[in-house]
Amino acid sequence: MICNAVFEGGGAKGIAHIGALKAIEKYQLKIDRVAGTSAGAMIATLIALGYSADKIYDPETGNGVLPPKISKIIFPRGISLLPAVIRILITLLVPLFAAILIVGIYPLLYLFSLFIFSCLMFIGVGKIKTPDKPLILKVTVSIFRAFFGAVIIALSCIILAPIVIVATFTMWNFGILSTKGVENWLVGVIERSPCYKRANITIPARDLTFKQLQKISKFHLTLITSDLGRKRLTVFDHENENTRDISVIDGVIASIAIPLIFKCKKILIGGQEYTFVDGGMLSNFPAWSYRKSLLFDDLKHTLGIQLSNNEVFKAEINNPISYFKNLTHTALWGASPIENISVKGLNVIKINTGKVKTLDFFMNDHKAQTLYQSSYDQTLSSLIENFSLFPGDSARYWLQEMSNSLHETYLDFIRQYIGDKVKVSKTRLRACLIACIDEQLQTSKIIYHYNMERDIDRHIEFDFLEGVAGVSLQEGFSIMLFPEDRSYRIPNGKNFDKNRINLLFIESNRRELVKSDLKIIMTIPIFSKAELIAHGILDAEVLDDNEYVQNIDFDKAKAMGLVPKAVLSIDFDDYFVYDLSGEVVRNVYTNSLNDSLLSIFSGLASVALSDFSASVAD
């Protein structure tokens, strides 16, 4: 299977992306389009240049084109302590003396402090958690908190703000660190890259453009930056007419230029100079770049690698520190879920990076190896538990084998159940594996199919709780649907209300695409084998004995919060069970034995698909 990939920004935490890439390679998934921001832009560029995970960083030897200590790239000649200390002192002391002169206006300091005090008093009164205390005590506590808070904020703003502002604009040239070391590193990386050597071209690495890279590597590389001059996001790739002829190195530097840490990247485009900083300011996880999808397009999956240290943010904001901390996080990343709505086939893999911080550029080898291995394990586990991603055509072969096997078992059951009183004919079946392709919009789609190559309904997408497969996916139990007379059967002979019955049938505008002569649709929910065992739904010891099969208690599974990973849907254009007079024997499909058989099918399919997914990574 060929996928898109998107890598989130995260500074030094970007080492985790390499572990994730190694797991993707282990699972035999191929990538032909990569997008990234900041640290993710560096990894995306290395992938587009043809580097494998082991060539980027090998945790066993510590070798690779990307050292775990990013400081080796930023400071290729090392960093001398004495000059650094002198520079910091000069940088801080000069603005400090200037700030002392500015702060000499005492009335201004007094008025500003009074303003802050009033604001804190307004916020603080009534917010103290002392419900049993008198009002005078609450007000007194608020006054003391507001007073000390006002003093701290006023001094910080009036004394520290000039230091930051003056130092930034006069001493640091919009950033403390130069990106020259990173640029030189990128030149060497491009010159030694597999695609550069394979193409045998004479273009200087420093001048390699996005358009030229796409031509020699066949990769679609997309990098995200923030344009300060135009106050908007800019996409660097070979399709953007404004950036296709910009060098790849300039695009990477523009995407990684963390404000105040690195100097801004100035790029000449169309005769005009533009100033760029880290793309993470506006879009740290650009999965939206793969949103385009036309009707009847085959689904193409997107692997999204997000980096998080699982930091818990408190809902209650009761002090200035938590206020500004949450305000910054909300401004930078709060819109990410909205940005990536309607990215069909987006599979987000969230990597817990532990205690590694964004600016941990001096990470030691042990810490880097631990982060790499943790990311590899988390990504591989996520891929194994994702029943919509499989390499090549392997899932289609599995689907064909499983559906035919279940069909044969079903026919054998009918013959034993009824005997010689009926005629059982083997009819042509269609089968498909349906899974959710957009969790936010609750949209499902046929991922793999068998005997549906010429049927247009293989392209249908299902809305939340729409269609028999959608209901089965959400409810977590098997359903037998008979479209001809709009009847159905669910476990234990239960009944749906009128609204739920209507949901079993796809909306009219899409219903016209469904094959019109279907007589039976059978849906079988597929769960994670590991989750079923962990919750006691299946017995691991019994599974080891191939002579026994287990059914799934759908009610118990739902009560424990288990949700199907996918649904196996099998349909027939014939009832295939008739009595001697030629009438359809409907009670075969609407009895408790049939319910039990479908629950057994669910157990068999869940175990089989879980084992098949795990075998891919062996």
Image: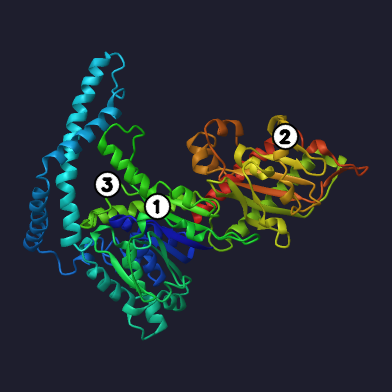
Q: Which residue is mark 3?
A: 355
The three-letter amino acid code for the residue at tag 1 is Gln
Mark 1 vs mark 2: which is more N-terminal? 1
Label 1, label 2: how far apart the Cα atoms are:
46 Å
Q: Quadrant of residue 490?
A: top right
Instruction: Residue at 18% x, 37% y: name it.
Output: 111
What residue is at 15 percent from the left and 61 percent from the top? 171
The answer to the question of whether label 1 and label 2 lie on touching residues, with beta carbons closer than 8 A, is no
Q: Which label number is shown at residue 593? A: 2
Can you tell which quarter of the image residue 255 is in?
bottom left
- Mark 2 neighbour density, 10 Å: few (under 14) some (14–19) many (20 or more): some
Badge 3: residue crowd in 10 Å (few <14, some 14–19, many ≥20): some
Task: Point out the frontmost of discs 2 and 3.
Answer: 3
Q: Are marks 2 and 3 in contact (CB under 8 Å)?
A: no
Look at label 2 and name its amino acid.
Answer: Leu
Question: What SS does tag 3 mark?
Answer: loop
The amino acid sitting under disc 3 is Lys
Q: CA distance from mark 1 to mark 3?
A: 15 Å
Quickly name the residue at label 1: 306
Q: Quadrant of the N terminus?
A: bottom right
- Choose mark 1 or mark 2, whichever is in front: 1
Disc on the earlier residue, 2 or 3: 3
Left or right of 602, for residue 367? left
- State whether residue 267 is above or below residue 102: below
